[in-house]
Amino acid sequence: MSTPEPTPPSSRPRPRWRFWVLLALVVGGFNTLLGIGAWTWWTWDHLPAVRALEDWHPEQPLRIYAANGRLLQAIGPQIRFALPLAKIPKDLQAAFIAAENGRFYSHDPLYYPVSYPGILRAAFVDIIHLAPVQGASTITEQVARNFYLSPKKTIARKVAEILLAYKLADHLTRAQILDLYLNKIYLGQGAYGVEAAARTYYGKDVSQLTLAQMATLAGLPAAPSYFNPVKNPQLARERRDYVLHRMFADHDITHHAMVLAEAQPIRARYHAPANNIAPYATEWIRKWLVKRFGANFTYRRGLRVYTTISPRDQRAADHSLAVGLENYAMGLDSLDPKVWRGPIARLKGAALKAALAGGRPSVLPDRDPANLRWGVVVQSSPGEARIRLEGHRSVILDRTDVAWVRLPPQGLQASAVNQVLKPGDLIWLRHYVAATNAGAGNRVWGATAVWQRVANAGWQLAAVPKVQGALVSLDAHTGAILALNGGFSYKLSHFDRALYAYRQPGSGFKPFVYAAAMDAPALKAAGHRHYLTPVSLIKDTPLSVPLPDGSDYRPTNYSNTFSRTPIAVWQDLADSHNVPSVRLLLHIGIPYAAAYVHRFGFPVQQIPQVPSMVLGSGDYTPMQIVRGYATFANGGYRPRPYLVSRIQTASGEHISLRDCALGYKPETPSTPAIPSGVAFLMTRMMERVIHQGTGVAAQILHRRALAGKTGTTNGETNAWFTGYSPRVVTTVWVGYDDNHSLGRWAAGAREALPIWIHYMKAALQDERGLRFTKPTTVVRRRYNPKTGLLAHSGPYKAYFLKGYLPPRGGSGLGAIKHFFHKLANFL
């Protein structure tokens, strides 16, 4: 058998599949490259234009400032402060470059505007971790991403970022790119840009930062939450030191400077954009701006609103109103005892443990109201209780600190501390306040309790009052609102009672009607034959006035008593008698009085043309009342109250305030609302209110030039005091929102006057030696207090309008006959 010969290797057939695989790879690769190229070209073509960044202005929040330039509130989605690169310190610029892009100023195309070695290094780390854990974005790329792209880590976004970085590099200089970066970068705690971060973490401008602080901020872009110097100081320190070493390596700082900066501790803490001390005022401004311009323009265009609020006066208003309302709730300045409502809650188990460690109990509001602080009772005994104050320190309350408490249901005063406080009780505390009687010399009103802080006296048990109040203070001459408070705590109630609560002013309304009676020329022009003077006598006897509906109106005095003899107009106002006031109104006529009251700015529809008008039966806001009293204080001109002095855009353009109800208007009234002589006579009479009337407690201020008037309504539902100096006029209202009674013995002199006194003590610090100016239309003459007529001699003198003096009284029987004739004409 013969063996077949093998086929030579060269003659064997080659496998055809290799060819096709190779061809497919070549074609596929070509198509892939073609597709990538087309996609890259499409991405480039659809990238946004970057020329607009040459004139970029960042979105900035609304900022509202006090009169002295202090920031009251910043409102907006982001905290920003646009700052030109020239105003950013060189060391701060170098710190961010060292931390984020050391070759930012390089001309090597491998490193600018994109760092390809950085991309390869990041890709290698991502492959090892099988996740995008490391970035490689230069400062230029970060600007591209921050302005135009999302932060989501994808290949598509990275390619777009690289392409956009080239666009930026073609159109902008490196200084422009760095300017955009330092003003746009997010640095944690809601702060965008280096200036916002400097203020947020250190409460400083960038120009005031130390090298160590600059390096700390420069370490934040990599991970703002992770390297946050407030939350993670140790990690922030490590990152800061890394930045300092990079700066030294880049020859930006010396070795000595680096060592000194590394030795600095991390002392950052969160600084709120503003500590808003006037939330009721800023809320009014915010609402008006949104209504006028819309939310987008209001919150994002960097509006700067400059107000008339005086920080000193506003703080005094907040504290005075809060303490006064707390005192009422605790029964410290009232003759009506208040029953203890008990603790806020009784904590047990985990809730108690967390509170003792400083955790805020969930039953509390987000922030402490007014000047109150929360605490938890740890131990209690008959003599004292140990309190953990907000979980940070221990304080002791003894019998004195809980002495005001009356226990339900009988309202008996507690005799032991542990009757009131038990372990686990969650309570409110405040700094100890002692109530002291002031204004001795008046048998009725000398008991007004004017409180005072006792140095180093510690804390006392307190309660959130259910009663509310309002305080408005104006510059009497310009109308500038110095302080405005619409309630006990803005955190608990946003309703602004100073501007929107319409309440009866009681006797606080009398001065407006009395001014109508003192304006002798106006009275005569209205057809009256007989005019009045401050010393005219009015009968104080029971009065019955027939009403159109067939019923009778019978006014009564607060004391439910009457005088045996007629009393002078000024004394009637000082002692706040009601019946003589109604007689005075009936004498001048209700229509005339209503028309005259309108001069003080009260809308006609709010003035009830009834006999009780003089007793304050109409409804008015505290702002309306204080505006009316300002007319007396400034000599007869009705001011226009304003809160906003000017508004500017971020570029410095002024916005018109013509449509702003509380905006400054440059026009001034050319003629007075009432004659200056009438304003002066009313001021003199209201000075007597403080010297010897219902406002006598205000003598504790030791000011000669003070005038004012108390007000209490029927049923004791409202308590007022409105008063003024030659410059400042202030009104205080106290009452319940549901208009129920403050208590049988509540009165303006007890509930409202102490608040006014404490506020004015602060507001008048700079007002020394001022006096109310006597106009030339007023003269001073001797008079007989028994007749109200002029006298040839005697110790009694009074002011009168020139040309409208009372007759000169004779002597003996003739004078008596003349007196009774005048009295009969009046009655």
Image (spheres, rainbow, N blue to C red):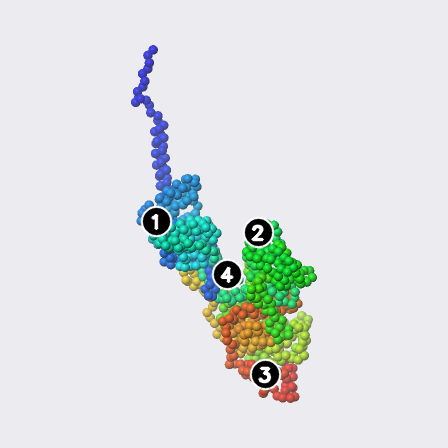
588 vs 498: above or below: below
Q: Is residue 111 visible?
A: yes
Work out whether residue 139 or residue 719 is closer to the camera in this orientation and state it.
139
Q: Nearer the viewer, mark 4 or mark 2?
A: 2
| Residue found at x 41% / y 39% | 127
Chain-order first, disc 1 or disc 3: 1
Question: Label 4 crowding class (10 Å Cα cut-off): few <14, some 14-19, many 20+?
Answer: some
Question: Label 1 crowding class (10 Å Cα cut-off): few <14, some 14-19, many 20+?
Answer: some
Q: Nearer the viewer, mark 1 or mark 3?
A: 1
Q: What's the distance in space between the residues labelled 2 and 1, CA to CA?
A: 50 Å
Q: Nearer the viewer, mark 2 or mark 3?
A: 2
Q: What's the distance in space between the residues labelled 1 and 3, CA to CA?
A: 91 Å
Most extreme residue toward the right is 410
Tell me the SS state at disc 3. Answer: loop
Chain-order first, disc 2 or disc 3: 2
Q: Which residue position holds label 1?
A: 103
Type of amino acid under label 3:
Tyr
Most extreme residue toward the top is 1
| Residue found at x 52% / y 79% | 774
Image disc number at residue 182: none
Chain-order first, disc 2 or disc 1: 1
Q: Which residue position holds label 3?
A: 796
Q: What's the distance in space between the residues labelled 4 and 2, CA to CA?
A: 29 Å
| Residue found at x 39% / y 53% | 259
Q: Is residue 365 visible?
A: no
Image disc number at residue 354: 2
Chain-order first, disc 1 or disc 4: 1
Tell me the SS state at disc 2. Answer: helix
Q: Where is residue 377 shown, x and y percent of the image?
A: 61, 56
Work out whether residue 386 or residue 359 is closer to the camera in this orientation and state it.
386
Chain-order first, disc 4 or disc 2: 4
| Residue found at x 41% / y 44% | 134
